[in-house]
Image: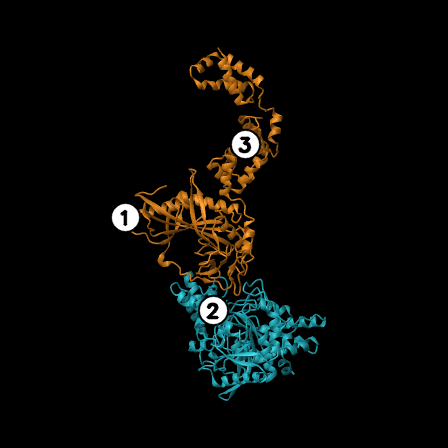
Chain colours: A orange, B cyan
Amino acid sequence: MSLPHNYEMVIGLEVHAQVTTKSKLFSGSSTAFGSEPNTQANEIDLGMPGMLPVLNAGAVDAGIKLGLAIGADINMHSVFARKNYYYPDLPKGYQISQYDQPIVLGGKLSIDMEDGSSRTINITRMHLEEDAGKSIHDMGSGGTSFVDLNRAGVPLMEIVSEPEIRTPEEAGAYMKKLRTLLRFLEICDGDMEKGNLRCDANVSVRKIGSTELKTRCEIKNLNSIRHVMNAIQHEAERQVEIWEKGGTVDQETRLWDPDLSETRTLRSKEDAHDYRYFPDPDLLPVNLDAARIEAIKGTMPELPDALRDRFMSDYGLTPYDASLLTSEKSYVSFYTDMLKNGADPKLASNWMTVELFAVLNKSGKDLDESPISATHMGELVSLITSGKISGKIAKQVFAIMLENAEKGSVMAPSAIVEAQGLTQISDEGALKAICEKAVASNPDAVAKFKAGNDRIFGSFVGTVMKETKGQANPELVNKLLKEAIDAHA
Amino acid sequence: MSQDLLTLTATEALSKLHSKEVSSVELTQAHLSRIESRKHLNTYLTVNTEGALSAAKAADAAIAKGEVATLTGLPLGIKDLFCTNGVRTTAASKFLDNFVPAYESTVTQKLWNAGAINLGKLNMDEFAMGGSGENSGYGPSRNPWDDSRVPGGSSSGSAAAVADYQCYAATGSDTGGSIRQPAAFTGLVGIKPTYGRCSRWGMVAFASSLDQAGFLTRTVEDAALLMEVISGHDPKDSTSSPQAVPAWRESLGKLSLKGLRIGLPKEYFIEGLDPKIREIIENATRQFEGEGAIIKQISLPHTQYAPAAYYIVAPAEAASNLARYDGIRYGVRVEGKNLVETYLNSRSAGFGAEVKRRIMIGNYALSSGYYDAFYTKAMQTRTLISQDFDKAFEDVDVIFAPTAPTAAYKIGTNSADPIAMYLGDAFTIPTSLAGLPGLSINAGTVEDSGVRLPVGLQIIGPRWNEQIILQVAHAWEQLAGVTQPPFVA
């Protein structure tokens, strides 16, 4: 999506990712989703008098992992500060967050665009902070609001990008890539519907070629990649219209309304809080040592970018397929499991991302709910690779496998091929006779073919396949048919 | 009979309890009667009559079975800053008038685990903000030496109750002198340990980087005994130290005064110090010198900046710590037309004038544009003050100073002049800012308007060396004799 009047967008994203720890950032309360309101909040989360925070070391480790994964500097000394403001879902009257000394500085994320190109977006910083609770308005009668503190104190990573993103598509790709990385590292489940990954977008516009940074607006709490992209586009268009009419954009915080497809003012700069940050005296500075970081390095999985490059060079996959297969940890393990028994890597990639994914999409399932195991998918592709069955037969076998799965039974593809007698006919002698017969019995077609109608060749193939119930080795059939036509006087 | 029981030291009472000469029920009842008959001193905000008697019965049963812990059966008073499970805890604030915690502070839990009896909750300056007890939301406590005078603060009820034989000892908390100064005003031993020695978990917070629990007792031995019980690391308080707790009580009497280097900081013997108090401190020093101690004049050059730094740092932390009192989840709620009005109404109704003053000072100091000039500067000053002490302790073993510039004054003297009140803490604040252990012990009496009033000698030690200040104070008791507050029948 582009902008009229030669404008371009300047976009920076602040992503909040919930760290998958069992307990909260500063208390022992559970972080499990979907419990009855206020059942997962203890005295600390409730901000009772005299209660003190104790830092969850697991959340710090998660921050270190992300920092290492994006090639950032890990700060050996970071500090938690208090961000002071009043709201009923903020029990202490302050949020514990990192401010001028975050745990991670710098880093970069390589984003993959639909057309196979990629761009690098620099990361400014990543810090740890606790989430606030949830205010629920308009639920009761008479304007009563409710507060659920189950979320209060849940650990978040706030990942801030440089304002280097230029299009909504890039913003979408950034979110996707970040989500992939977080899931690979198993530090955030990336579930945007549950609010476990959400995004604030800072958007401004300027004339293409300008390096000026114009007034930006922040759009808060975007909870799907589609919303991120749509909100940015509409906000940018709104700003262009203002500038073009000779107006000025006011710095403010805005909300995205997906129903009306517009952003609207949440609060203006004048209403901006003075958060009165200062180091939280209840917590010691976080001092890391090299040994801890080395230990975490040792547990890091191979990361998506490295895997993608390896899949391209080792298996000859296209950038698109390699990116797709490395977009989820589960895809990588499924795919590599498929390759264990001699399946051709490119064929395996096609079968997985085209045939299997189509089935999964249709039934709305994730890969880990696949009706067919990676081993059996791999075996099916191996049967093609070794020439035991043709691709066409493989589709028949695949259909049978799916039917079996539906009935709750499992049969290996090789067993299906055996049982149904679907083995490919590669016996040249037997096929030669069938091909010669097909040519001989249709002299008209031979004449047309020789006259230049190439497409008529398919009718010979069809005849042979009909005769062999589709089990003839197609490459061999092609070769033998050509020989037979040539031989036909 | 009752007087004999009440005027025992805690150590003596324990020895009589554990040798079954006296029962815990007898001691508890004696104290409860004493509390009842001395109500005009306004020491207890909540008397735990039933709880204390049932705990005393249980203690007697345990003693009968030979199950004796360190403090089994000993009746104590608790500053109303320590949250006590099921017993109302107000921090002397009307805001918490109806607050009954569902949890126990670590310090009090340790006391109960050791067998002590909770007689009730003691008056104080609201949220520990004050040096006279006059800032209590429940009226001032009175000094048993002269009930027209303040007992000091903020641990006003603790000091008055111990000095008036309404408990054997009482917990206090010291942020800028709140244990030592009232101990001086009532002729008691008051010890504030090194910052981090005791857990702050469950102590209603005033200024987190300064607050420390401690004890007011009638003898050094009692202080050593009780401090051993409440000290030590608590995983629930990140700022509590893993330092081992020495056997302080056993160490008493084992220090040779010969060669002990005592520093007298010239900055504490200044104009504004009552000459009669100066004379008493100098006299005490001479007696130590007579025993072979070496007296050194030292300088703590940044002392004069301590009150200014303190009255930035402590209110800044307090403003944030008290933000949780918003009327939403507990405490006072005065409904308004909307959320902001409810906040304003509740906090206006719940907090006293001094608390409001400090919240305003604190928020101002943390505001954007002022932070560096105030908070940052104050923290830098704090570092300089701390370095003054570190340097001094290279040459001396302990530092002697007056605890307060005056003896106890009449109720109402300073209440209209907050600055005069703040300067009353000038001698105790530097130790607090540096996080060092300090103790006040009665060094003699002065006469004012025909009334004898006690004067406190402040003994300051190096970090983690509570032992030496206890030993020196104990040596003073041997030299001067233990002077107990007068018992008024």
Residue B382 position in % (x across, y down): 46, 70
Spot the residue most to the left.
A246
Q: Residues within 10 Å of mark 3 (few under 14, many from 20)?
A: some
Describe residue A275's horizontal placement relative to residue B162 as left or right. Answer: left
Residue A144 position in % (x across, y down): 45, 57
- Residue type at mark 2 is Thr
Q: Secondary structure at mark 2?
A: helix
Along the line of sight, the residue nearer the viewer: B21 or A197: A197
Pointer 3 residue: A344
Along the line of sight, the residue nearer the viewer: A28 or A35: A28
Pointer 2 residue: B383
Q: Secondary structure at mark 1?
A: loop
- Rounded to the nearest angstrom, the CA distance separating label 3 from label 1 is 60 Å
- Rounded to the nearest angstrom, the CA distance separating label 1 from label 2 is 56 Å
- Residue type at mark 3 is Asp
Spot the residue most to the top.
A489
Res. A462 visible in picture: yes
Residue B290 position in % (x across, y down): 58, 85
